[in-house]
Every structure is written in C-alpha cells, then in structure tokens.
Image (spheres, rainbow, N blue to C red):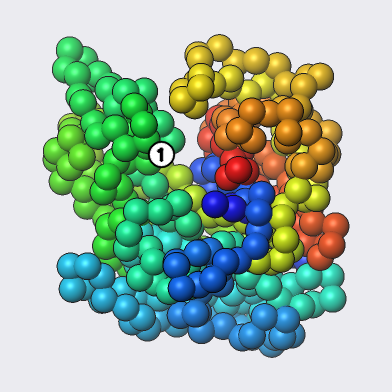
Amino acid sequence: MPHNPVLALMTSPTRLNLALLCCLALLVSGCAPDPADNSPKTSSNSSGSATGEAKTAELAISEREVATDPDGKPVTLFQLTNSHGMEVEVISWGAVVLAIRVPDRDNHFENVTLGFEKVEGYFEPGPYFGAICGRYSNRIAKGVFSIGDKTYQLATNNDANHLHGGDQGFNRRAWTGKAVKKDGAVGVALKLVSPDGEENYPGTLTVDVTYWLTENSELAIEYKATTDKPTVLNLTNHCYWNLAGAGNGTILDHHLTLDCDKFLPVSDSLIPTGKPAAVAGSAMDFTSTQPIGSRIKQVKGGYDHCYVINGADGSLKPVAEIYDPGSGRVMEILTTEPGIQFYTGN
C-alpha cells in the first residue's frame, strides 16, 4: 500500500516546520484508491475548505463529534487553523492526524497527509495512518524484553516480532481530548491511560500528547508520559506524507536531506543488527539533497531504516528537510530525539 511521509513544515508561505519525535513515513505510490475499501484518501469527514481554494482565516480551534467508536464512545474531531489558512485536523481515536492542508507556491491548498476516506476506517487494523504508536513504536525482536530479572513476552503481530504496541496499540484506543491555546498557537491536548498488563507491558502508563499549530505554520507534537513501575516506552506519530498532495502521484521526485552520517542496518525481519554503519557512498546517503527515487531500487524493500542524528544532545534541532519541486512545498523536521525513522512504504 502506498505511503508518503514528511515531518516538518514552516511557512514562507509554502514552507512548513514540524517539531516532534521522529518517524518519517513517505508513501511511494501516492495514488488514492477507491474510498469504498478504506484506501488512503483525504477524509470525507474533514470540515476544511475545498482542495485548491485560497483561504482567509485566523488562529482558531473548533471541535465536533464525527463518529462513534467500537465501544460506543463519541469520536471528536478537532480542527486547528491559523491566519495563513493552514489547517490541521485531529481525531480523539488513536490521536490520529486526519489532515494537514497547506498552500503551494501559487497559494493553492492541498492535504499533504494520507488517511482513510471515513473515520471508521481507523477502527480496524491498518497502516497506522497519522496515529500515535505505542507503547513501543517500531519492532521488538520476537516480542521479548527484560527489565531487571523479569522477562516479558508481548504479542508477535509482525511476523515473529512485536510492532507498534501490539494487537491493540495506542492507535486503536479512545483518547480524551480538549482544546488548548497559548500565545501564537492553538492545539489539542490528548490523554490516554494504559493499564498495568495491557498488551503484557508492565506498569500503569499515563500518556499526554499535544498537537500545536502556530502562527508560523509550525506543527509541534509534545509527548509526556508517567508510569508507576519500570516499563519501556517509545512513542511516535505515524503520518504518511506527500507534499504534492494526497493522491497526486508518488514521492519519488521529492528531494530529501538528512543530517545523519550513520544509519542502523537491519536483518531480513527489519530488526537492527546493533552496529551503526556509515551512509557515505551508499544509497542510504542523504547528507546532501537527493531525490528519494534516485537510488531507492538499490535498497531491498525500499527505505525503512533508523538514521542516527548527528550531534543529538536532547535539544530541539533540525534534522531533515523535504522539498517537492512540483508544488514548491518544503517541510523541515526538528526533534529532540537521537534517531529518525525513514519509511517509504514500498
């Protein structure tokens, strides 16, 4: 299934800046199939202006119920807007980012993330479109980890491995959400409590994720979690990006730059081998700007690798930039984390 990833956007006016824990998912095939089968497409539940329409707006947030989840609870959609017309839509189910609408060089707006046509598509297992993944995003080999002298066996939902929190990860949970504001930004604060033993993880875990949209057209994602006993935790947002607009071709012509001299080689089952490797002279090298499709066929299975960020010290720093020549849109990604996962979904 096609995925298009981008992670940060700043405006000038076609520039976006994204600050978050890093997972860069780009869908190679950006086509939007028939919505009848929950294929990726701009959500019909979206309340924004039509694609391509120039907008006038202000910094604001609204909310409304758009569906009922499998447990009979209402699903709330939060729409964030700024004065430049940028829109971000988030739902309480899975803390999913439904849509991000930004202008191109001609001030035509498009949704640059992929998702399902209907909110109900997010209730079933799927490709984690726009969701918060947890407790542990990415893979745990054979679903086994140890804390002290105790070993825990998790579900193996990705062949022999554990992926993105298991059968009932945070992407398929009802979060509570509320609208929040601060100087120069509007946001939605989402909370989830994962009980001790859920998916066989130890400890009651309380997770807070806040999405902020600023007047500078920055989308910031803030994460916080507390637990009552030692546990493991690795949260991320799993947006798929196509800066040309969802459904507008592939991302093979997108230009990518990564501030990463090393990456983590993986086994055939995509488990890191444990020793970082230099990217220099290989198809993994994006230290200078490269079209994503220029060497993708040299990488078995496409890109699905963790890159080691140069000079990571826990401070917020720019690590990636993506540019679509066709639309003129640019996304810059900043993070406090030591690595960024680059995934092309092919």
The percent coordinates of residue 2 (x first, y second) are 59, 53
Residue 283, image x and y in percent?
76, 27
Q: Which quadrant of the view contains residue 153? A: top left
Q: Quadrant of residue 10?
A: bottom right
The one nearer the camera, 345 or 25, is 345
Q: Going 46% across and 80% down the picture, which residue do you hit?
A: 45
Q: Is residue 339 visible?
A: yes
In this view, the residue in front, 35 or 201, is 35
Query: In this orientation, does residue 12 appear?
Result: no
Residue holding disc 1: 137
Q: Is residue 218 left or right of residue 151?
A: right
For this view, does 298 lie left or right of residue 79?
right
Which residue appears at 32% of the width and 37% of the height?
157
> Residue at the spot x=65%, y=62% of the render?
31
> What is the residue that sits farthest to the left in this orientation?
196
Check disc 1 and report its element: helix, strand or loop.
loop
122 vs 322, left or right, is left
Residue at 73%, 35% in the rendered image: 296
Q: Which percent across, then down, holds residue 128?
A: 43, 52
Q: Is residue 146 above or below residue 324?
A: above
Residue 314 x %, y %: 54, 33
Left or right: where does residue 295 sit relative to residue 16? right
Q: Is residue 294 above or below residue 249?
A: above
Q: Could you classify mark 1 by the number of other residues whose Cα lies within 10 Å: few (under 14), some (14-19), or many (20 or more)? A: many
Q: In the rendered structure, which amino acid carries the disc numbered 1?
A: Ser
| Residue closest to the eye, 207 or 77 | 77
